[in-house]
Image (tube, helix red, strand yellow):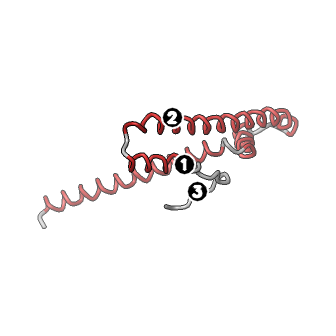
Amino acid sequence: MTARGRSYLLLGITLLIGMLLGALTVGALGRARAGRIEGMRHEDRFVRDMERILRPRDETQAAAIRPVLEATASRNREAMGEFDARMREALETLVRDLEPHLDTEQLARLQRFADRPPPPRRPPGRRPPPR
């Protein structure tokens, strides 16, 4: 192989390695972000994470801020429940609006998708099973 050919091969390998590392990094960051958002659904994890971020000076301060954090965690859980309900309603509206435009097979596929239960709530920090 000529020097020019080796240079192209090395450049191509470097490009592929860079693309692979970039894809892995994006995936890892996305999973971390999704885990943080999912953690907001669980009151105890939200409170624990906020206490870790705030690092109360002493037990007196921790006792003073804990009720505020717990109330916020409760509101977060309620907001997520409302969001889930609104998304379910939007999906039902989508099915209703598309029904006149779809054939029987398309409508059946969409209905199967719409009828699926929401994904189960995982304990905080657990990854979903592989597909």
Q: Which quadrant of the figure has residue 127?
A: bottom right
User: How far separated are the C-alphas under marks 3 and 1?
Assistant: 24 Å
Name the residue furthest left.
2
Name the residue furthest right.
60
The percent coordinates of residue 55 (x first, y second) are 75, 39
The amino acid marked with disc number 3 is: Arg
The percent coordinates of residue 3 (x first, y second) are 14, 61
Q: Residues within 10 Å of mark 1 (few under 14, many from 20)?
A: few
Label 3, secondary structure: give it. loop
| Residue occupied by mark 3 | 127
| Residue occupied by mark 1 | 115
Left or right position of 103 against 95: left
Left or right position of 42 against 22: right
Residue drawn at x 74%, y 43% is: 43
User: How far separated are the C-alphas under marks 1 and 2?
Assistant: 13 Å
Label 2, secondary structure: give it. helix
The amino acid marked with disc number 2 is: Thr
Left or right position of 130 against 65: left
Q: Are marks 3 and 2 in contact (CB under 8 Å)?
A: no
Lower sequence index among marks 3 and 2: 2
The amino acid marked with disc number 1 is: Asp
Residue drawn at x 58%, y 50% is: 117
Q: Which mark is residue 93?
A: 2
Q: Nearer the viewer, residue 84 or 38?
A: 84
Mark 3 or 1, closer to the camera = 1
Q: Which mark is residue 44?
A: none
The percent coordinates of residue 90 (x first, y second) are 53, 35
